[in-house]
Amino acid sequence: MVKIATLKATPDWKIFYTLSNGEERTSDLKHFLQFDVFKELSEPEEFLKIHNGGYFVEWDSGCDLSLDTLNKNSILLRGKQIAA
C-alpha cells in the first residue's frame, strides 16, 4: 500500500510530499481553513507543526487529513500516477 515517505509544509498553507511509489505531489490546503476544525491552522506557525502519519498527516492541534483526501486535492509534480 502506498504511503507518505516525506513531507514538508510551507507558511502559505501548502504541503509537498513524496509517496512510497515515487510520486511527488503538492497540495494547497488553504481552503480547509474555512472549516471550524481547521481554524487553529490559520496561523502559519501552527500549520508548520505537521507530522507524517504514513497514511495521513496530523497537526499538533489534532487536525488531520487522510492520504486519500490529500491526493484528491493535489497536483502531481513528478512520477507516474497510479489509477485509483
Image (cartoon, rainbow, N blue to C red):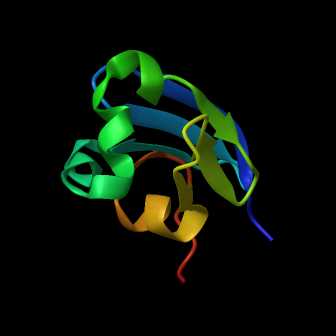
Which of the two residues, 46 or 66, is positioned nearer the viewer here? 46
64 to 12, vertically: above or below: below
**Quick check: 46 above or below 77?**
above
Q: Nearer the viewer, residue 44 or 40?
A: 40
35 sits left or right of 51 in the view:
left
- x, y percentage for residue 19? 67, 50
On screen, 16 above or below 38?
above
Find residue 3 and report its image quarter: bottom right
- Name the residue rendered at 58%, 72% in the picture: 82
Quadrant housing the C terminus? bottom right
Task: Locate residue 64, reporting x and y percent.
Answer: 55, 54
Q: In the rendering, at what x and y percent does residue 74 appear?
A: 37, 54
Look at 32% across and 23% down and name the residue there: 43
**Front residue of 63 and 83:** 63
Residue at the spot x=76%, y=52% of the render? 54
Is the N terminus in the top left, top right, bottom left or bottom right quadrant?
bottom right
> Is residue 83 or residue 18 the one in the foreground?
18
**Which residue appears at 38% of the width and 55% of the height?**
37
Q: Position of residue 63 (x, y in %)?
A: 52, 50
Report the label total.
0
Quarter holding residue 52: top right
- 68 left or right, relative to 35: right
Most extreme residue toward the right is 1
